[in-house]
Amino acid sequence: MDGAMFIGTWWSLVPPLLAIILALVTKEVYSSLFIGVAFGALLYTGFHPWNAFVAFFDIMKSSMNLNILIFDVLLGMIIVLMAKSGGSAAYGKWAGTKIKSKKSAMLATTGLGVLIFVDDYFNCLTVGSVMRPVTDRFKVSRAKLAYIIDATAAPVCIIAPVSSWAAAVNSYVPADAGITGFQLFLRTIPYNLYALLTLVMVLYIAITGFDFGLMKKHEQNAAKGDLFTSGGEEFEQIKEEEVCPNGRVFDLVLPVAVLIVSAVGAMIYTGFLGGATDIITAFAGCDAETSLIFATMITVFFMLLLYLPRKVVTFKGFMDSFVEGFKLMIPAVAILIFAWSLKGVGDALGIAAFVEGLVGSNTSASIFIPAIMFMIAIFLAFSTGTSWGTFAILVPIVIAMFPGADRLEMMIIAVSAVLAGAVCGDHVSPISDTTVMSSAGAQSNHINHVSTQMQYATVVAVVCIVGYLIAGFVKIWWVTLGMSIAILFIVLTFMRKYSDGKSGRAAASDPD
């Protein structure tokens, strides 16, 4: 059988669709991606077993991006070192002396979640362990703490240019897309409605003290001294991890600052090396991958000088953190390798040419694609529990839908919708790693966290669907974002007034 008969046809869609279906059925993304790549290799070689085997590994080797893998490993090392130093615990003690109200406790928790943007796993575990004693003192329910942790983990990482997420998205963009991966990521930020609106909602809830649905019951119980409502007995025997008593707040803050400054500086420098004449064009045309590796290496050396002389971390502990960081990043690395390979198989089968011919330049249909892709990404991420696996599958497909410079803005909007939907689905999925770790970090019953968070996330998701319909029509980011924020405020204000009115009526009807 000749493999050429499958190239540029609807068969090119089968590998990613197969990966999606298997992921939904098995709830497991690694084997699903692997089978998708393997079947794509069989199609490409006309179902010749040996040729498919060779093509599988040839495509994998040619699709891999070593720079991104190096960055992930070094970032994992930084995350482990931050945890070992005791800086997180020191921040918690410092915050406990400064925070004087429940509102301040929730805002400080939100602020720390935003500060630790380099990785969502590290974010969930660190924010929970640091802020839990503070929020307990001001009677913030564990379900509310878990929500704040989860809402400032993945939603923050997906809009942070210096993160493992940015590096991953950068790696999915083909060379002929008309835009670099880093430029694409930067331009998706203002269109990433779920991430931005989730942060707006967290601030609104923290400042106003408004709660609804099941969360309201948890907060009412917490005010009476019951922080858990249910399931608290499972945390009675948990022992806190020992941390270095010599850690200071700057052990957490300074490495993050060095990482940001060195990454931005390296990006601007590589942009000027590429022929840029001003900072804006330098930043847009930079070598992001090399810059991120440089920044992580500088940060590792800085942490060496910051920690070792003060004996915050031993030299052996410092070197062991490299292997521990590698282990921490293995899930992300595995997904990336298979996702790159799936994209490579799609390129070999001519998926871009087929999708372009299928979609064509039908503007009336394309304006609905962002909203549709947002919902598809939610469903896939919710079912599989992984945002990385979701946008690894869908981003290359969406990019192929909008080839050419004339449809670049629609491609950016559609990619943003996939990233936003993947984060949303991951946010509400009971089997998501970040959802589980947010429950663990807050020491909240997992079902309580999932059930309360889902109601809050649904409000934001519905507003996002309207926002992406607006984006498809206007194609202007500030109009889209401004209108979406306004709609969210209107919805929350209406819900708040309705809730207050309902409470007032209930109080009036109770003679006691």
Image (cartoon, helix red, strand yellow):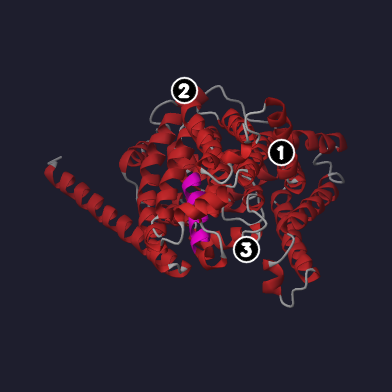
Residue 325 locus on image (x, y percent): 74, 37
Q: Amino acid at mark 3?
A: Gly
- 10 Å neighbourhood of mark 1: few (<14), some, or many (≥20)? many
Task: Confirm whether residue 375 shows in the render.
Answer: yes
Estimate the spatial distance between the alpha carbons at disc 1 and disc 3, rounded to whole Å. 24 Å
Amino acid type assigned to the residue bearing label 2 in the image: Glu
Q: Residue furthest front?
A: 1
The secondary structure that dominates the magenta segment is: helix
- Please name the residue that numbered disc 3 is placed on: 178
Q: Which dot marks residue 233?
A: 2
| Residue at the (50%, 42%) spot, across then down | 10
Residue 147 belongs to magenta span: no
Instruction: Identify the magenta region.
Output: 410-423
Q: Please check the rendered image and state whether residue 420 is part of the magenta-colored stretch, yes or no.
A: yes
Q: Position of residue 241 (x, y in %)?
A: 66, 31
The secondary structure type at the circle numbered 1 is helix
Q: Is residue 458 left or right of residue 338?
A: left
Q: Quadrant of the C terminus?
A: top left
Percent position (x, y) of residue 475?
Answer: 45, 67
Regarding mark 3 in the picture, which secondary structure is present there? loop
The amino acid type of the residue labelled 1 equals Met
Q: How far across and down, in percent of the image, does residue 445 sit?
A: 45, 29
Observer-nearest of 435 and 10: 10
Q: Which residue is mark 1?
A: 60
x 38%, y 38%: residue: 452
Instruction: Give the quadrant of residue 376.
Output: top left
Q: Is residue 274 above or below residue 501?
A: below
